[in-house]
Image: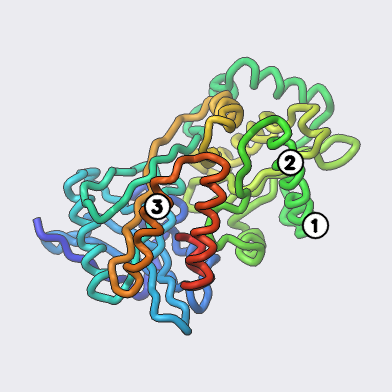
Amino acid sequence: MEISLVEIENPVTWDEELIEYQASIFLSSLWLQSVATQSRIPVFFKFFADYKEIARISGLMICPAADKLKLLFFYSGIVSKLRDPEIISKCRLALLNYARTNGISRIIIRSYDDKNCTQTRLPAFKINKRVEYVICLERDKDMILEGFHRSARRVVRKARTAGVSVGISKSVQLYDLLFEMMTETRHRRKRKGYGDYNALSIPFFDRSAMLNLLKEDKASLFYAEDKEGILSVVYIFHHINVSYAILTGTTARGYELDVSACLLYEIAITLKDKGCRYLNLGGVPSGKKNSGIVQFKKSLGTDVVESCEESTNFILFPWTLFNPLLFLRRKLPDRPFFRFCKKAMRKFMEIILTPDSSVL
């Protein structure tokens, strides 16, 4: 089967069509427009065989004006109704050929909200496996809570008994408070022995993009509070009948009252009423030190969704000269000193290449 790739110039109905694919929320035009700049241009591709569309993908063409370097960056992988590994592999090959033909130096495919991951068989793509934790909302409300582990149900009742209530806001002030809480959450996790992590891990999703989605009513700030004030805040992106928890922060008192499980349960119920099929709680930073976060997310009755990130080395000269650095970064073990070395290598490439190469 011969597969051709076509770039779509005016994807007016793109997001509505994604529903049929049960595709990642991060393939939506709405998301890509929220992170677009003059040097990050949304691109939309369809794959055809025998004149019929069989798959699609969308992402960003990263092309700084002052630099000849061009990257293709995707937040999630190729989606196909056929779910055939051979077809997906051929689509990846078509994408690789497109990159070579159009002077694109590298392809990077992340796996945010990717429920249809099919591991590639192409040597050109390197793989990094990851998982996400998803609460299914296509159940009765009682069954959602019933799916929680009994310890999680107990802390939900504990928070309610303590007078904790849940609300929704689009307030910029609450958004700023969330970032203060995120700092507290990060420090608290480090004190408990969890591994360090970058809370703003989704590339290019900055303050401007976050506030724009809030303004367009495609994101919401859910918060838990008691008579003493705000205890916890979660930033939720919701679109094309799915939702994704991107940021969360909790105060010291919020931890004392165990409000997180209660807040996430109320969020799930609210999103179910809005017609969302599931709530994706995202992944967990790598490393054994973060097993406590894994345990918490599993206690909420989540499905564990396995996926894989894929990327090529640089495929065009002179950028291929950086491939030994990419190879070395992949091979270094996940230990404190080597993590520092990996960050130093990434910073070096950012300085030499372009600020948008932070996705490297």
In this rendering, would 57 be left or right of 254?
A: left
Q: In which image quadrant can residue 315 be found?
A: bottom left
Relative height, residue 295 to residue 18 (above, below):
above
Give the label on residue 18, or none: none
Residue 328, labelled with which disc?
3
Distance between mark 2 and mark 1 Cα atoms: 22 Å
169 versus 142 height, above or below: below
Element carrying mark 1: helix
Measuring from the top left, give residue 106's x and y in whole percent.
34, 65
Q: Of the residues under marks 2 and 3, which one precedes in the sequence?
A: 2
- What residue sits right under mark 2 in the picture? 187
Three-letter amino acid code of the residue under disc 3:
Leu
Q: Residue at x 50, y 39 (%)?
A: 278
**Element under disc 3:** helix
Depth check: give the residue in front, 312 or 266: 312
**Residue 137: percent from left, percent from top:** 51, 34
| Mark 3 neighbour class, 10 Å CA radius: few under 14, some 14 to 19, many 20 or more | few
Which sits earlier in the primary sequence, circle 2 or circle 1?
1
| Residue 236 visible from this viewpoint | yes
Earlier residue among tags 3 and 1:
1
Which quadrant holds residue 130?
Answer: top left
**Residue on which the image places disc 1:** 173
User: As shown in the figure, which amino acid type bears the numbered disc 2?
Assistant: His
* Residue 300 seen anywhere in this rendered image of the structure: no
In this rendering, is residue 128 above or below 1?
above
